[in-house]
Image: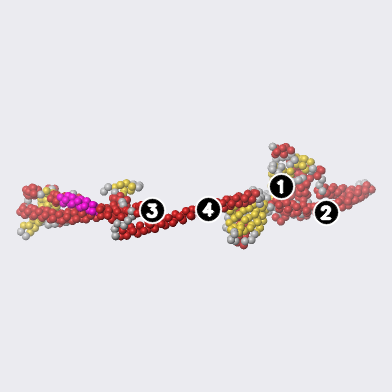
Amino acid sequence: MSFVQKGEGALIPAWTKISQLPKSLNLRNRLVLGLTSIILIIVIGQTLILLTEAVVELDYRVATQGTILAQGVATATVELVAEHPKPSAFANILKRVRQQIELEELSITDDHNMIIAHTDPSLVGTLDSNIMDHVFTSSNAGTRMKDLLRGYSFFEVAAPIVRGTYVVGHVRQRFHSHEIAHGIYHQLGLASVMGLFWLVVGWLFSFFYVRRITRPLEGLARAVTAMSYDNFGPELIKVVPETHDEVGLLQRRFKRLALSLAAERETNASLMASLKEMNQKLNEKVMETTADLQRTMTYLQSIMSSVKVGIVTCDKNGMIVQVNQGAIKQLAGLATPMPRTGVDALLPDGAVIRETVVKVIAEGSSSELVLERTAPNFVAKRTVRFRIHPLIGPDQHRLGAVLNIEDISEQRLIETRLRRQERLVSIGTMTAGLAHQMGNYLHSIAGFGQLLANDLPMETRLQTNATIIYAESTKAITLLERFLQFARPDESKLKPILLAPIINDALALCRYQIHQGKIDVINQIPELDVTVESDPQMLEQVFINIILNAVDAMAGRDERILTLKSELIARDRSVEISISDTGGGIETKNIERIFDPFFTTKGVSGTGLGLSIANQVMELHGGRIEVHTGENEGTTFTIIMPLTDQRFLSEEKR
């Protein structure tokens, strides 16, 4: 059997290609091939029957001849077998048998199946136990046909050697027979010629008969092909009924269907022309409407981009749809709003935003949120206000929500400063009047104390007491005058000074308290070569108050570190001095009151005036004090002052 290679080395028999051949043929060729195959099968079957009959007849005749010859050999060897001669005694008999047939093997055995003569002398003296299987037997026709096709033409027969009434031995012979082979080949040749003749006749009959059947169908196929290419021309006219059988009926029905389709085609063509015209007008209208919508969208986008307030729209699932530049600026440092993200990403820990948005969409009412968050890498908290409104469609269907976002941190800081300033003004006015009256009393006490000291004898106890009264009264008067200076500072004493010496002097004056508190100082302030407009004594007092407050805040803490830093802010033309401690921080409820006069958390050891006076001094200098703190996180006071250094300003202009 031949093979072909396919795929990854798999062997596929060549007949598989033959089995696929009908799929590539048309109907006529397939019918011809089918009928021809049937005829071929019939011819082959008939040939096999004839061959089988011939083989049976020849097989019987040859087997009969072989059996007669075997019986003759048995008769000729009766006496020899009885005498138990030597094997050479049978030589003449073997020679005569070879002359009559094409002998392959001849075996003569005694009554014990012992070989006493054989064409192969080496087998003499051995047993032939299967000799009885061949006595008067022959192969059947089917076996003989198989053997002949394989190239075998051997016959094997056996006959008993009888002396009187006793079987004294057996004769078994195996021989060739060319007669059957020649007969079979003759029959095969004859059958092949006849089969080829009938095959040709059958193919011609099949061809013309099938052609008569398939010719109308081919006409239908051409018409269908023409219709598939939208051709309703002459091909359809050629499809005329030729018979009155089922094919003719099919042709008539097809022609009626084709005419109906042609009419519908004309109707559809007219409808398509009308539809095309309507579609063109609709496209023009859509393009016009789209252009209007595009202009409207551009106009709205321009409005949203120009608005400083942040605007974010989201769907009903809380997913951001649109973000303007105002929202990005308002939330800078806290988050970066992006479309297709949740509204809870607008702020750190923003779950409350999503909850409020869901509630607004569900209830259809507006809401407002004010949230405080700390930006990453920043200590200061920022306050952001969210005004959330539902988005409602024309059919009153809730589409989502719109969020107005505004960073009101600066506004809150200004409001806090204004409230503090109002308290300072009222308390300062009252305190200034009280200090003025107290000054009058102290001047009287000091005057009388000095007169009394002059009138009393020298170095007496009374004279010493009068002197002490005068001295202490004078100190009190000086303190009140300084207090009045803080309450009503004199701007005429402000002058340009170097900032670094003031900070270093204040740190040196607090050295004793720092040493006593076992505090480590990290002074990261370089030699600032910048100038600020200030009163040196007042500015020094500001730094002293803040440093001493930091020392007191770290009392009893495990970690005690005082850190001083500076930074130049080019855009504001200012300098920032940060003083940080590792104390317990300031409670949230007290942050807004730390700059109020007489507010203190130190108990009886504090007056509550240090930070109040420091804040008022910085406002006089055009600066401010900012505080960043958290419970158990320490506190940082940042002193911000405008620069007057012309070199620095000139570099900025360049």
- Of 479 and 262, nearer the camera is 262
Would you call the spot at circle 2 few (<14 residues within 10 Å), some (14-19), or many (20 or more)? few
In the current view of this chain or complex, which residue is farthest to the bottom?
Answer: 363
Query: Residue 429, percent across and down?
Result: 82, 52
- Of 453 and 76, nearer the camera is 76
In-image side of 598 versus 374 (left or right): right
Q: Which amino acid does label 4 sit on?
A: Lys
The answer to whether the residue labelled 3 contacts the one labelled 2, judged by CB atoms less than 8 Å apart, is no
The residues tagged by marks 3 and 4 sit, at their Cα atoms, a distance apart of 31 Å
The residues tagged by marks 3 and 2 sit, at their Cα atoms, a distance apart of 111 Å
Mark closest to the chain's N terminus, 1 or 3:
3
Q: What element carries label 3?
A: loop
Q: What residue type is labelled 2?
A: Met
The residue carrying mark 2 is 430
Q: Main secondary structure of the magenta part?
A: helix
Quadrant of the rendering where the C terminus is positioned = top right
Which of the two discs, 4 and 2, sits closer to the camera?
Answer: 4
Would you call the spot at circle 4 few (<14 residues within 10 Å), some (14-19), or many (20 or more)? few
What residue is shown at x 81% (from left), y 44% (from top)? Answer: 491
Query: Residue 145, percent across and down?
Result: 18, 53
Return the mark for residue 281. Answer: 4
The residues tagged by marks 1 and 3 sit, at their Cα atoms, a distance apart of 94 Å
Which of the two discs, 2 and 1, sits closer to the camera?
Answer: 2
- Of 142 and 340, nearer the camera is 340
The residue carrying mark 1 is 638
The residue carrying mark 3 is 232
Part of the protein shown in magenta: 186-206
Q: What residue type is labelled 3?
A: Phe
